[in-house]
Image (spheres, rainbow, N blue to C red):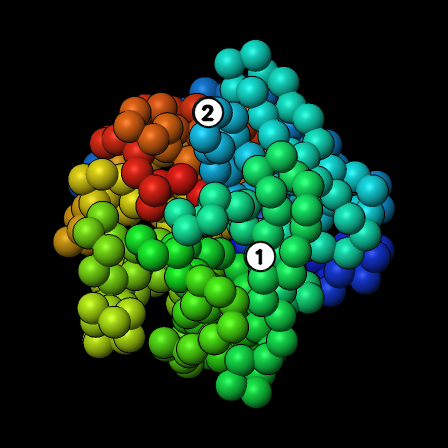
Amino acid sequence: MPQRPAQVLAALAAAATLALTGCGTQTAATDSGPSAAGTGRTIRAHEVMRLTQVHPETGMTLLEGPVFDKDGRLIVVDVTAPAGEPKVLRVDVRKKRSQALHTDSRGAYTSAQFSPYDGRLYLSDYAHGEIISLAPDGSDPRTFFSGPVDGAQMNPDDITFDRNGNLYVSDSRGLSTGETHGRVVRVSRDGRTATVLARDLAATNGISFDADYRGLWISELTENRISYLRLSDEGRAAARHTAVRVDGGLAQTDSIAVDADGNLYQALHGRPAMLVYDRYGRRLATIEIPARAKGLESATNIAITPGGTTAYMTVSGPAGGFLYRFDALAEGIRQSNGG
């Protein structure tokens, strides 16, 4: 979750001193016109509903981490929601209705995903360096992981799980200073052991396993690039390289999702759009909202219906926090459902 530091620091200080968030707040909006020639086709997303409005206490709203629960309802977090306002929402996309699932007095939640191990909903709290979990109905909040890793507190942004329920975190350390202190951290499924798999990254943001669970796609916000971290069978880092250099202009790389064909959906901070690449870095498509939609500045993340191709994109800006729908290029899997 990227941000314009001065604006976000001020807004989150007003929201129970939440400090700096990390998943895609507002900077200057860019033109969301048609894709340039040779960069794939344009797919138009259509508005489903507005979920939130700008909070007076924080001066913004920011939706993130869409993920489907087992009943087909969409779970969404509002990163800058103040104390007492819904920080986690459950949405019936068919009826276009939403309800509060969880709130508290301090969390700044930047992502959400269900664990394949225990079925609980996991949330990353960027401001406090914690991972918490909830029962699927929003009850029973627990701290899953908290504290320093290798002597440094995390700024956990996005999360993803392997098949066994171990959790992988994009740690966006260094974002506020522009230093390359970002990391990828693996937390064992019992929450007892945290291991740094990669370090010296440029504001680590999006993170997702590839379709075969052989490695991790990682977006680095301040370098506008997607890196690939290949893993060993034991879950250790085996190799890393720059996979895609994103020509975003004023826009920057936010969260990442992967569909059943292995295509990457790269969200953009600073532009209400997403770029789609194949596993070899070829640009396939650009997901755009209609040009008539005003006051929307960032598309942070998507969830593709498991086993289907209907995708829901979280888009935010001064006009509020919205859900947009489009047809994905392939079916949804765990790697395209939250994180």
Residue ranking furthest to the top: 95
Name the kind of residue labelled 1 in the image: Ser
111 and 118: which is toward the camera: 118
Instruction: Point out residue 68 in the picture as x, y percentages from the top left corner.
Output: 46, 33
Q: Secondary structure at mark 1?
A: strand
Front-lying residue, 311 or 307: 307
Return the residue nearer the eye: 103 or 138: 138
| Count of numbered circles on the image | 2
37 to the left or right of 49: left
Residue ID at (68%, 50%): 141
Q: Position of residue 55 (x, y in %)?
A: 78, 40
What residue appears at the point 23 percent right and 31 percent down from the top-left corner? 330
Alpha carbon distance from label 1 to label 2: 22 Å
Secondary structure category for the residue under label 2: loop
Q: Is residue 290 visible?
A: no
* Residue 76 screen position, x and y as percent: 57, 37
Judging by the rendered image, the residue that carries numbered circle 1 is 124
Q: Residue at x 58, y 62 (%)?
A: 144
Q: Quadrant of residue 215?
A: bottom left
Which quarter of the image is occupied by the N terminus?
bottom right
Is residue 46 positioned above or below 195 on the image? above
* Dot in front, 1 or 2: 2
Horizontally, is 13 left or right of 4 in the view? right
Q: Residues within 10 Å of mark 2 (few under 14, many from 20)?
A: some
Q: Residue furthest bottom?
A: 151
User: Counting other residues with Cα less than 10 Å from the Cα at mark 1, is it few (<14), some (14-19), or many (20 or more)?
Assistant: many
- What residue is drawn where x is 68% and y is 66%? 128
In this view, 326 is above or below 200: above
Using the image as rendered, state which of residue 293 and residue 236 is in the foreground.
236
Judging by the rendered image, the residue that carries numbered circle 2 is 72
Residue 299, compared with residue 111, is above or below; it is: above
